[in-house]
Amino acid sequence: MDNFKEVFKYTDTAGAEKILINGTLKFSTPKTLNDPYDLSEIKIFGYNFLDSKLREEEIEEHIKLLFTQDDLPAPNNNSLTTVFFYLRSHLIKLPEEKQKEAFNTLRKELLEEEPDFKQFEESDKVAREFFNKSFASDVIFCGSKKFNNMPLWAHYAENHKGVVFKFVPNIAKDSVLRTLREVKYTSAKPVIYRSPKDLLHKSLFGDLNENLLKFITEHVHTKGLDWKYEDEIRIFVANVPGRPFFQFYNYQADELAALYLGYNMKPSDKEKFQVFAIAKNPKIEIYEMIKPSGANGFELNSSRIK
């Protein structure tokens, strides 16, 4: 958990009114996110599993692990892992000459065995379909680290006619905002298995659920480099089958720490939102954004009015 002390939410006037009156934050489904590739197209393998040379690398690593005298990581509860450790326990007890013979025989047989690539393709397809279907019903709250991001004001706050809210998570009250995490920007999507060696080690060792959770967390908080300007932090909520589907979550009144009014906002809207905000939290700080000019260049500044 990143434990962010604040998050800024950009919104238009219609969205701002609902946030203040209803006291809730809307979480988006993947289909409604502005990035069509966000939370889509899960990648299981980071390599071409149909490549025979890479398959040979996996076999070599597998045999190496079977015969090594070194201590191995803790096994998982996979049935194949049980077979692996059972076989290894007998192989490493063989005399040295018998070990060499078994090593060469096993290596030869595995390398000569015709790989079932169709099974790999089918497993990959089933896994991707499962993940994509699961993510379709999950929800995300998107915010930013900054209140004065010019493109975000233009894209999400009605071209400076909307507002930005500053929320400060109330950890003591078990706020949903306590789960904010930073988004990482990269040129490549996360994968479950980076290489044949990675596939083998994750299949045999460690906690399977922990490895899966780590991947899901990474996948949910990764976006392409083109979105880096957003400086996004987000909350991900997985909707469990059989439980009620929630898309709106309450925030505590004292978590609404500040309100920033766009410099293109109508005077009547400015008055209205100040009244709404103060009614929600009398201690709220209210700012008015200042249109960049002169020496300010393209930098957005604010002036406190309450």
Image (cartoon, rainbow, N blue to C red):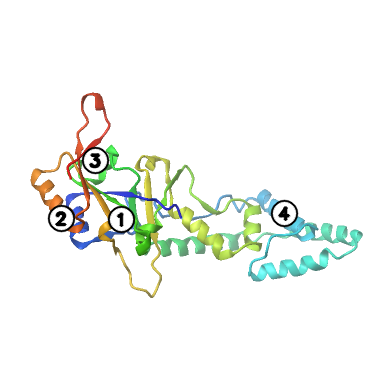
Q: Earlier in the sequence, mark 1 or mark 4?
A: 1
Image coords of residue 286 (percent x, y): 20, 46
Tell me the quarter of the image containing the C terminus: top left
Q: Amino acid at mark 2?
A: Phe
Q: Amino acid at mark 1?
A: Thr
Classify mark 2: helix, strand or loop. Answer: helix
Q: Earlier in the sequence, mark 3 or mark 4?
A: 4
Classify mark 3: helix, strand or loop. Answer: helix
Check contact, mark 1 vs mark 4: CB within 8 A: no
Disc 2 marks which residue?
A: 276
In this rendered view, identify the residue nearer to me: 109 or 103.
103
Classify mark 4: helix, strand or loop. Answer: helix
Image coords of residue 114 (percent x, y): 70, 59
Disc 3 marks which residue?
A: 154
Q: Quadrant location of residue 80?
A: bottom right
Q: Amino acid at mark 3?
A: Ala
Q: Is residue 24 left or right of residue 61?
A: left
Image coords of residue 281 (percent x, y): 21, 56
Q: CA distance from mark 1 to mark 4?
A: 43 Å
Classify mark 1: helix, strand or loop. Answer: helix
Q: Which mark is residue 32?
A: 1
Q: Quadrant location of residue 288?
A: top left
- Which mark's residue is nearer the viewer, 4 or 2? 2
Q: CA distance from mark 3 to mark 2?
A: 23 Å
Q: Earlier in the sequence, mark 3 or mark 2?
A: 3
Disc 4 marks which residue?
A: 61
